[in-house]
């Protein structure tokens, strides 16, 4: 195995790969330390107010949020790291002898793409498996300490399928009981059934909803039928976990779902049609497509900073920071167009990599050979 590696990975390759990975690791660590410092100063009063133990703050709150922020910063830190150490090599006239020694620019790119492939593997499997788990830790912290004093939801609206709607005036997450419950079924625009109950509770053993003090009105054209009762059990396509999602909608509960869970939720949402389908699809597709930015941004970074310029590394680094912000803007705009302008989510997720991939190919043609 070592002989194969030595055959294809030469000394200059090891030098560039080590520079790449160490610069990336150092830069990411610096950013995470800065994030922790500012976050502690901002949320220290909240931690003291909710009496969150130090273990929960360290292992749940920061154990969840630091990987989340690292995942967001991953491609951009990668981009800045490539520009920084490549521009430094160019400024120290290390690249000119390499290209002058009959080494093509494509061969010069090999160690960069080996290193970016290593990062791609971490980024990809982290997105699919590790990051959803750590996100669930931060969501659990928010539920336990930030929302523990208010377990009751107010004015809950939910769509069970394309023709069934439910409403609760309030719902208690602790005892899984709702009050002033209304269920309506439609046939097109025509109301066919309306059930009103004073209370509804979930029986976890039978896995059914128990409806108490109810009245059901059936409508068939001009004919109506009214049925009343004190209690009955019924099966509804909703679970107490659905109300947890309603409670955590501001914390983006979808990023805390595993990939298999979010796939199941997407299929369920296609039936329900509650308006969250695009959010779920964007979250799922980002997990698979975002890691490819390692290759796209590495190509741009090397092509941009491999030429020696006056003023040292300042100009390439400044252009790199500008492109970082531009990448974020394009990504946000693509998401907004998907949410508001019916742009397919799979296309919205691909747009940043397609645009910047084209920029990378153009810069590659203009790079010093």
Image: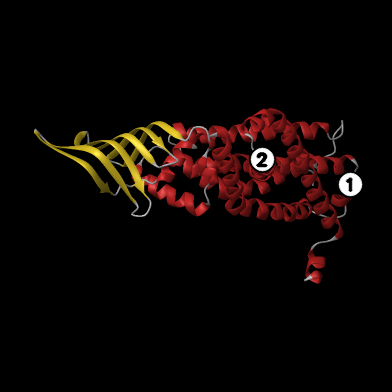
Q: Which residue is mark 1?
A: 94
Residue 76 position in % (x across, y down): 69, 40
Which mark is first along the chain, 1 or 2?
Answer: 2
Residue farthest toward the left in the current orientation of the protein: 223
- Mark 2 lies on a secondary structure that is loop
Q: Nearer the viewer, residue 160 or 47?
A: 47
Q: Nearer the viewer, residue 76 or 142?
A: 142
Image: 227 above or below 257: above
Q: Is residue 40 above or below residue 262?
A: above
> Can I make out residue 19 in this image?
yes
Q: Residues under labels 2 and 1: Cα distance?
A: 52 Å
**According to the image, label 2 marks what residue?**
53
Residue located 26% across and 40% down the image: 212
Q: Name the residue rendered at 44%, 34% in the picture.
A: 152
> Callout 1: helix, strand or loop?
loop
Quadrant that contains the N terminus: bottom right
Callout 2 touching callout 1 (CB < 8 Å): no
The location of residue 366, given as percent across then percent down, is: 73, 41
Q: Position of residue 368 (x, y in %)?
A: 79, 43
Few, some or many residues within 10 Å of mark 1 (<14, 14–19, 20+): some
Q: Nearer the viewer, residue 257 or 74?
A: 257
Please say whether residue 367 is visible from this viewpoint.
no
Q: Is residue 366 left or right of residue 52?
A: right
Q: Number of labelled discs?
A: 2
Label placed on residue 84: none
């Amino acid at each position: 195995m070592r002989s194969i590696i030595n055959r294809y990975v030469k000394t200059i390759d090891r030098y560039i790969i080590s520079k790449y990975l160490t610069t990336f690791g150092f830069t990411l660590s610096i950013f995470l330390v800065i994030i922790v410092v500012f976050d502690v100063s901002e949320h220290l009063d909240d931690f003291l107010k909710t009496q969150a133990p130090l273990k929960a703050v360290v292992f749940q709150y920061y154990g969840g949020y630091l990987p989340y922020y690292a995942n967001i910063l991953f491609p951009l830190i990668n981009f800045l790291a490539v520009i920084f150490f490549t521009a430094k090599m160019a400024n120290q006239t290390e690249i000119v002898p390499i290209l002058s020694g009959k080494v093509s620019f494509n061969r010069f790119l090999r160690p960069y793409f080996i290193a970016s492939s290593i990062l791609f593997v971490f980024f990809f499997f982290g997105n699919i498996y590790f990051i959803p788990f750590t996100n669930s830790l931060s969501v659990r912290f928010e539920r336990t300490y930030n929302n523990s004093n208010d377990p009751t939801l107010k004015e809950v609206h939910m769509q069970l399928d394309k023709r069934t709607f439910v409403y609760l005036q309030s719902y208690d997450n602790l005892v899984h009981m709702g009050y002033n419950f209304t269920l309506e079924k439609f046939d097109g625009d025509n109301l066919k059934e309306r059930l009103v109950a004073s209370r509804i509770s979930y029986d976890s053993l039978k896995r059914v909803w128990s409806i108490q003090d109810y009245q059901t009105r059936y409508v068939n054209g001009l004919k109506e039928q009214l049925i009343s009762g004190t209690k009955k059990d019924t099966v509804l396509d909703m679970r107490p976990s659905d109300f947890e999602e309603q409670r955590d909608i501001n914390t983006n509960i979808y990023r805390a779902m595993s990939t298999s869970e979010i796939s199941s939720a997407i299929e369920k949402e296609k039936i329900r049609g509650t308006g969250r389908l695009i959010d779920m699809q964007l979250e799922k597709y980002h997990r698979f497509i975002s890691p490819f930015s390692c290759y796209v941004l590495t190509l741009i970074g090397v092509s941009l900073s491999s030429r020696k310029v006056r003023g040292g590394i300042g100009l390439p680094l400044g252009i790199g920071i500008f492109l970082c912000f531009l990448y974020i803007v394009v990504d946000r705009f693509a998401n907004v167009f998907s949410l508001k302008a019916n742009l397919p989510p799979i296309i919205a997720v691909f747009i940043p990599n397609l645009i910047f991939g084209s920029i990378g190919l153009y810069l590659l043609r203009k790079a010093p050979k």
